[in-house]
Every structure is written in C-alpha cells, then in structure tokens.
Image (spheres, helix red, strand yellow):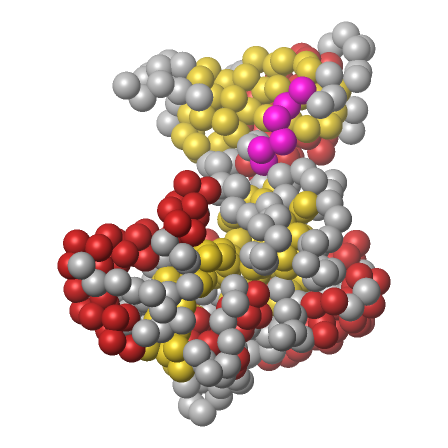
Amino acid sequence: MNPFYDALETRAPDEREAALMAALPQQVAHAQQASSAFASILAGVDARAVTSRAALAELPVTRKYQLLERQQAERASNPFGGFAGIGFGAAMPRVFASPGPIYEPEGARPDYWRMARALYAAGFRAGELAHNCFSYHFVPAGSMMECGAHAIGCTVFPGGTGQTEQQVQAMAELKPAGYIGTPSFLKIILEKAFDMGVPLPSLSKALLSAEALPPSLRDWFAERGIHAYQSYGTADLGLIAYETAAREGLVLDEGVIVEIVRPGTGDPVPEGEVGELVITTLNPDYPLIRFGTGDLSAVLPGSCPTGRSNQRIKGWLGRADQTTKVRGMFVHPGQVAQLAKRFPQIGKARLVVSGEMANDQMLLQVETTETAPGLAQLLAEALRDITKLRGEVEMLPPGSLPNDGKVIEDARSYR
C-alpha cells in the first residue's frame, strides 16, 4: 500500500521550492485583483517581482486582529472584510464563524481545507468509516475534516461534540476504523465506554487537533490499540502541517509557503530559532498573503524519516502575541524589535517584566559582543523613547537567551 498521499510529498526539495516560488507571484497578483483587502494592503507591490522568499519577506504581515478589524469595519457591506476572493453562491457552499466573530468562507473545491493529506498520514484509507467528533456548527473544524475524509474515499459519521453515551453506542454499532477530534474528547469517550462495559475494538487510529497531545496521553491511547497522530491547521488557512509515523515534528503541507519570523515583526529568523508562523496560502478563494498565525514554532533540520521531503516544524510552542501592560502602558513585541533594529551591534533582545503588583520593573536583555562604554545607556534611552517607560539594561554574550521565541517575558508575581 502506498504510504504517501501523492507524489508531491516526495519530490526533491529544490523542485518543490521552484514550484512554490513560481506560484507565488501569481498568487500575489490574484490577491491584489480578487481581494479588495489585499488590493489595499499590497498597493504599489509589483507581483511579478515577488519570486523569492527574500522578496516575500518585504511584504507586510497581516495578523488576525487586523483581519478582524477590517471585517468589523466593512461588515455592513462585506462580511469578509474584502479578504475573500469569492462571494455567496455556488462557489461558497458554507460560511463559518470563529470567535471574534471572524467569518471564514468555504470554497466548493474538493478537500478545500487540504486535510486529506494529514488523514492519510494518520492511516485513514478509502472504504473506511471515520467517526468525526469535531464541531459541525459555527466553526469549520467538522467540515474541514469531513471534506478531507471524503477526498480519501472515507465515509464519515458526523458525531460532533457532546452526547458521550450516544457516541459510544454509535462506535460500537457502526465500528469506525478511526476517530477524528480533540484528544480530550477521545479520552472521555474511551473512559465512558469502559464504564459502560462496551468494547470498541474497531478503533485503531486517530487524527487529533485543536489541543496539545502530551506523550503520556499518546501512550494511554496506544495501550488501548489506538495510534494517534496530530495535525496543525487554522480556520483561516486550512492544513499547515501534519504528523507522520516517524513522530518527529510536523511535516509542512504542500499548499502553503511557511515563514518563521521574529514576534512583532515580519523578519524571518535563522533556521532552528523559535518565532511566529507566518503563512502564505495558495488557495485562490481566500488568498491570504503573509498571514500571521500568532503561533510559535521552529524549523527542524533535515527531512522526515518516512521519505516525505518537505520541511518540518516542531509543532505548537506557544503564542507569539506577548503584549503586556506595564505601569498602565501596553508594551508590544514590535517595540522591542524596533529598538533592536536601531542597534545593529546587538543580536537577540528580550524585555523581562518583573516585580509585584504596582511595582513593575523592566529589564532589557540583549546579546552582543560590543563592549564599548555607553551602549547600555543608549539602549536604556531608546527603550524609554519607544515605550515611554524606564528600564534597566543587561548585556549578555551571544547564545545566552533561550531559544523559546519570547520577546517579552512577564515574570511578575500575581499572588
């Protein structure tokens, strides 16, 4: 049996990169033409010149709060804020809503969210029944997984959330090959089945998402004969990365261009450094260009032992929006990045906020080999100029700060 969903997964990395970079200027031009939002965001950009990652990195990052703001501003005339490239009708069979609310279109193309690749890597095959316990109302998760399962050739039972005893009964009688949903709900179902004295021997695989899957819980599933795999995607972008049998990070999907940038900026970080995932999707119906997910991750070196040749990421490592309030003032990661750009002699920078209630203290930690006197004072002055707050400065040798993607660390006591 073929272990790969298609030939794209094993193509040479340089072949993949050439194909992505060839598609990139076309997608930028399409976004400018089909999306009024990107016509504004990318005004003056020559799409024909965006043929490399360096050129892509020059374009602005659009973050989720900005998408929400534009949707809210234009809601009376355009519920998608001008980001969608399609409108109501046959081209858009469904619309979903995520918290905010942010409205997301679902196009009519098969496997619109590209989840089939993740399901296939998790062992789902044509002719099987998949028990889908993601929500089918408001949010797109249920539909995302169902569309992918249908593309493989699976039948889907739309279990949705809740009604645990009925879920157990349906599994016992329909005998699905696998479960799709959150890890916590799968655990609840299995515990309920045990309490009811109902065996579920048909369940042998699971594609899990939306929550962390700690090794202890993965082992708990394995003890019950279920091989669990993770996937990472969003309601805006669809699939971004998925787990394979190698269990070494998540392999990137073939339909996205992924960058990892320093939080608060659009500047790509060196390979292996933790930063914010920024995605450019090749989806023509919702052509998001440099969309900031707000999630932290890092690129893993090498390729997947299964033979899939695309880059891998470590998975979800936290949130990139580290905005915090200090002495009544908001301090943003972008302000720390702005300060760092003023001083080319420093590398990584981190702002540590400490103290107790009503006694906030700021310490700017910077990595540098510079020993010239006065640099610390200049950094302290720049910190005050940018944030309007006073802080101390600590000079550190390169490699001192942890590789965790944190630009602002809130170390205050809230007891």
Residue 365 visible? The answer is yes
The residue sitting at the bottom extreme is 90
The residue at 78%/29% (across/down) is: 344
Image coordinates of residue 108 in percent, x first then y, are: 49, 85
Please report the bounds of the magenta region as a residue range. 400-405
Q: Magenta region, mostly helix, strand or loop?
A: loop
Image coordinates of residue 284 in percent, x first then y, are: 60, 78
Q: Quadrant of residue 258?
A: bottom right
The residue sitting at the top extreme is 373
Name the quadrant of the N terminus: bottom right
The residue at 49%/71% (across/down) is: 124
Q: Quadrant of residue 262?
A: top right
Decide whether residue 401 is among the magenta residues.
Answer: yes
Q: Quadrant of residue 97?
A: bottom left
Q: Is residue 291 left or right of residue 195?
A: right
Image coordinates of residue 324 in percent, x first then y, are: 43, 32
